[in-house]
């Protein structure tokens, strides 16, 4: 199809869907459809935060999206625990991510979800797999991350730290999931065909969820046009590479391997099912860790007192006889309560997954008396929750690791007040491994380098996607610390 004709067709179809929904006259729906909210807010999540803050109940309904959004912890507990069976991911969500995630754990409900959840729980909960993950992260830090940072140290060479963290986490999760090393963090910072295809597929899948009507992307997919054509091509490449990994593992044997693919292959013979499961883990383990680390170092640039406090804790807990600070052991990191609090506080303000949606199977009434009609999309919003005075108090917008400490020890919060890792039956199984990976990176970097963000006062602007990635990355200058003997 001629590009000009396609552009005209697309704009006319969007306008048609827009006119269909003009029956709703509320200001919120009008602002969403016309994007007029962008006049006051850089990020959609900040606009939603503003609307939720003004709501007496902490719950709003976006009619044009059929979406009820809440920041009320009691509502969150109701959705994720009390009435869990009434709020599955739902068919609309499964359709949006189905081409990318297939029947992976993050895109299914019922028996399929329970089966994968049970298997993942057994694998990720084992000491051997956690040790394997820790060893992978430690090796990537020593062999690639630290040499890369040293190579640009003191050269006034701007480095995109977000890109570094995305490469770092992609290497790690590919090794952990597939037993594959894509080498994204080598000194030359090579282009990975797999990583690029995976990124594009994730971004374009997320675009489906933002469409004012699912008819838009479904028609594009039917006609193989525009972003849906790009998505199809990207997923085809992901599928080919995933199948290649599965074939190689079958040829070489998998009984003595520790990666997730090998472990799942001992139980599952369906290659498509294996692909869906492992791609889901790639999505979860790559972007979330990179997002969390990016936000953390942006916050550190504005709070040098927090960086100093972490270094002091590191010196107390981990210090070798030759005076050089090493990567902390798994057990030593458990004693670093301030570091844990600093990461949790960063994730409170900048959760990698800014919101999560379910779909009501039956009519329901939330604890705040909001009526939910059958089929309604129901969303809890961790990003907005972290900015609610009614949830976190008058200093909710401030970065204060101390709010997590009592007598110097970390004290966890109610998970329904802090659903950064979900809560209830769908609580994130990789939570501990993700936090350990982040701790390893933080300690390795701040013990050896001074990282200075080029423009620390620039508020993060997020690019559209399944996770919170900063538009334009995080440009930094790196300076290696002098070693004091």
Image (tube, rainbow, N blue to C red):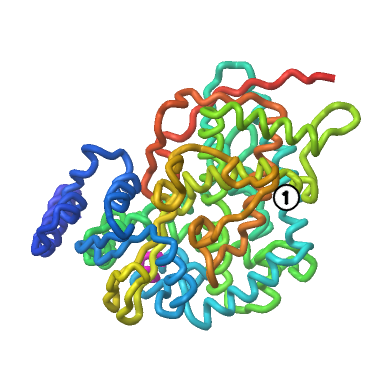
Confirm whether residue 228 shows in the render.
Answer: no
Taking the magenta stretch, the answer to whether it contains residue 157 is no
325 vs 283: above or below: above
Give the residue displayed 67% in from the left and 65% down from the top. Answer: 260
Left or right, residue 238 beside residue 434 = left
Quadrant where the image shows the N terminus: bottom left
Left or right, residue 192 beside residue 52 = right
The x, y position of residue 369, in whole percent, is: 30, 71
295 vs 128: above or below: above
State which quadrant residue 219 falls in: bottom left
The magenta segment is: 93-97
Give the residue displayed 74% in from the left and 68% down from the top. Answer: 254
Left or right, residue 419 beside residue 22 = right
Give the residue displayed 10% in from the left and 58% down from the top. Answer: 25
The x, y position of residue 150, in whole percent, is: 68, 25
The x, y position of residue 325, in whole percent, is: 80, 32
Confirm whether residue 186 shows in the render.
Answer: yes
Q: Main secondary structure of the magenta part?
A: helix
State which quadrant residue 282 falls in: bottom right
Quadrant where the image shows the C terminus: top right
Q: Which residue is mark 1?
A: 136
The x, y position of residue 414, in whole percent, is: 54, 60
């Amino acid at each position: 199809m001629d590009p000009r004709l396609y552009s005209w067709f697309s704009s006319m179809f969007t306008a048609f869907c827009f006119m269909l929904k003009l029956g709703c006259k509320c200001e919120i729906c009008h602002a969403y459809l016309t994007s007029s909210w962008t006049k006051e807010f850089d990020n959609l999540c900040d606009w939603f935060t503003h609307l939720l803050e003004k709501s007496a109940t902490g719950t709003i309904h976006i009619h044009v999206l059929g979406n009820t959004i809440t920041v009320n912890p009691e509502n969150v507990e109701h959705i994720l625990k009390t009435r869990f069976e009434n709020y599955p991911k739902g068919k609309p969500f499964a359709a949006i991510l189905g081409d990318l995630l297939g029947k992976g754990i993050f895109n299914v409900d019922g028996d399929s979800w329970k089966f994968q959840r049970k298997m993942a729980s057994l694998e990720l909960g084992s000491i051997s797999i956690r040790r394997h993950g820790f060893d992978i992260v430690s090796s990537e830090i020593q062999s690639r991350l630290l040499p890369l940072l040293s190579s640009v140290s003191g050269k006034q060479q701007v480095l995109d730290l977000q890109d570094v963290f995305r490469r770092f986490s992609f290497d790690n999760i590919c090794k952990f999931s597939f037993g594959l090393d894509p080498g994204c963090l080598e000194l030359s910072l090579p282009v990975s065909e797999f990583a690029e295809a995976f990124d594009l597929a994730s971004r374009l899948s997320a675009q489906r969820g933002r469409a004012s009507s699912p008819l838009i992307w479904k028609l594009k997919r039917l006609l193989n046009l525009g972003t849906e054509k790009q998505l199809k091509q990207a997923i085809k490449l992901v599928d080919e590479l995933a199948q290649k990994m599965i074939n190689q593992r079958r040829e070489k044997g998998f009984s003595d391997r520790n990666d997730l693919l090998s472990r799942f292959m001992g139980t599952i013979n369906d290659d498509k099912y294996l692909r869906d499961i492992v791609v889901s883990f790639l999505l979860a383990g790559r972007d979330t860790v990179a997002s969390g680390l990016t936000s953390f170092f942006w916050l550190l640039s504005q709070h040098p007192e927090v960086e100093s406090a972490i270094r002091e804790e590191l010196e107390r807990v981990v210090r070798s006889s030759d005076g050089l600070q090493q990567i902390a052991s798994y057990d030593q990191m458990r004693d670093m309560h301030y570091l844990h609090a600093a990461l949790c506080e960063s994730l409170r303000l900048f959760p990698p997954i800014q919101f999560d949606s379910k779909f009501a199977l039956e009519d329901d009434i939330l604890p705040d008396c909001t009526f939910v009609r059958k089929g309604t999309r129901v969303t809890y919003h961790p990003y907005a929750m972290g900015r609610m005075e009614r949830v976190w108090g008058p200093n909710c917008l401030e970065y204060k690791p101390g709010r997590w400490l009592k007598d110097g020890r970390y004290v966890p919060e109610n998970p329904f007040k802090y659903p950064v890792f979900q809560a209830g039956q769908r609580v994130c199984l990789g939570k501990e491994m993700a936090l350990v990976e982040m701790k390893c990176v933080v300690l390795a970097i701040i013990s050896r380098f001074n990282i200075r963000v080029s423009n620390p006062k620039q508020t993060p602007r997020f690019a559209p996607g399944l996770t919170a990635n900063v538009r334009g990355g995080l440009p930094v200058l790196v300076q290696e610390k002098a070693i004091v003997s």
